[in-house]
Image (tube, rainbow, N blue to C red):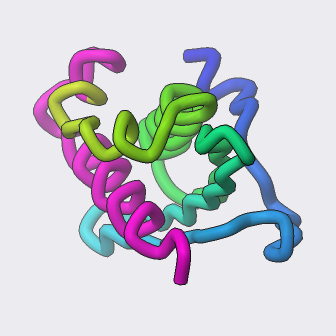
Amino acid sequence: MAHFLAPAHARCDVDSDQWHADAVIETPGADARGRLFLRVDDQGRLTAAFAAYGPPVVIAVLDGLCARVSGQTVASAQSLMPNDIEQAFCLSATQRYAAVMAIDVLAKALSNLGR
């Protein structure tokens, strides 16, 4: 609930120069849109932020994803699976799309690193 009520990683006015990569994902059926921003520090650790529109579960899951990958390496972030997010948030069957959405936007942003 805290990830929705007070998302620590939400950004609405992001300075694109401070981020090394980003990616956007949409799920028209759920009327959800998310954008994930990534930065890698000198030790190879990630910092993540997001902007989102949609149901509360999307906001909560993207904030939780940012909390989970921030401070981790790229390899660690790449190992996350939708099931990890589903379990962390105890998502119902109708909310599982948010976990898939989060992992998809993470994979896209990670692939954009270094471009």
Left or right: residue 112 versus residue 14 is left
Q: Residue at x 37, y 34 (%)?
A: 76
- Relative vertical location of residue 54 with respect to residue 31 in this rendering, above or below: above
Q: Residue at x 52, y 31 (%)?
A: 72
In depth, the one of 55 and 114 nearer the eye is: 114
Q: Which residue is drawn at 25% across and 68% down?
A: 29
Q: Residue 75: percent from the left, percent from the top?
A: 35, 42
Left or right: residue 114 versus residue 5 is left
The residue lying furthest to the left in this view is: 93
The residue lying furthest to the bottom in this view is: 115
Q: Residue 58: percent from the left, percent from the top?
A: 45, 45
Q: Give the range drawn in magenta.
A: 86-115
Q: Residue 50: percent from the left, percent from the top?
A: 63, 53
- Relative vertical location of residue 81 with respect to residue 78 in this rendering, above or below: above
Residue 28 part of the magenta-drawn span = no
Q: Is residue 93 visible?
A: yes
The residue lying furthest to the front in this view is: 43
Q: Which residue is drawn at 33% across and 16% down?
A: 88
Left or right: residue 49 versus residue 34 is right
- Relative vertical location of residue 59 with respect to residue 90 in this rendering, above or below: below
Q: Residue 79: percent from the left, percent from the top?
A: 25, 38
